[in-house]
Image (cartoon, helix red, strand yellow):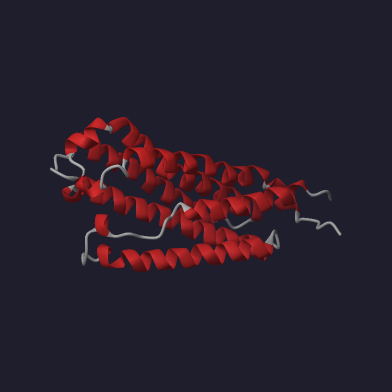
Amino acid sequence: MTQILPRPATSLARPAHLLLLALIPLVAFMALAHVTVVGDAAAEMTAAQVDERALPWMAVAVLWMLPAAFAAVAFTTIATRLGRGGPVKLLAGLGIALLVAYVAAQAGVVWIDDAAILAESSWLALAILLSLLGWWAVDLAAVLTCLRLYKSKVAPRTALVIGVLTALFLVLEVAVYLPALIGAQELHATVGLPPMALPVLWAILGGVLWRKTQAPG
């Protein structure tokens, strides 16, 4: 028997597409970051090495924030169309603003910073902090959106699983970075969970939502 969706759910195709499209900058980031950064231990890179890679470095910074930005717009649209999207709008907007500031801080690493190596760069420390806060804000927006989908009975099982996994990921990552955030260790030396796993989860949600919107009835 074909599931008949609540009327608001029938207009979720566009945000579903955004969640799927977020995979494109994700793949591009992984490919370009490997060429640009992994060849040298990032923390030990000198200002000259960073300067030599200025354009790909900035491209990596932009690609790093795009999956979260796509998702933030998608979550805002979903929550708004299902009603009561205020908290999601706030978190998504905050996340995008922080990630744009992250890109600006990375520009500071490339063109302003005069630290001998990246491990000593205050601009890099700021960029990492902004990136963490930006992604965490979008993570929270994702959790609230999944909760709204669950309550609206739109792909409830998928929304519940993705929401729980995103919340668990967020809690674990905050726990990993907490020592660095309170000054017990350096941010650049902290190895957290791979946040790029989240857009894959969100793309699964996007695929399920898109499929639901195509169902007859």
At which x and y percent is residue 32?
Answer: 40, 38
Q: Which residue is drawn at 44% across and 63% down?
A: 170
Give me the residue at 27% from left, 67% from top: 179
Q: Quadrant of the N terminus?
A: bottom right
> Position of 3 compared to 13: left or right?
right
View extreme (right): residue: 1
Q: Can residue 43 be seen in this view?
A: yes
Q: Looking at the picture, how far across and down is residue 22, in whole percent?
A: 53, 43
Q: Nearer the viewer, residue 179 or 41?
A: 41
Is 143 rendered above or below residue 96?
Answer: below
160 is higher (above) or lower (below) than 31: below
- Residue 164, percent across and down? 55, 67
Figure disc tally: 0
Q: Which of 87 and 160 is in front in this view?
A: 160
Q: Residue furthest front?
A: 39
- The answer to whether residue 209 is left or right of residue 164 is right
Confirm whether residue 22 shows in the render. no
**214 versus 83 height, above or below:** above
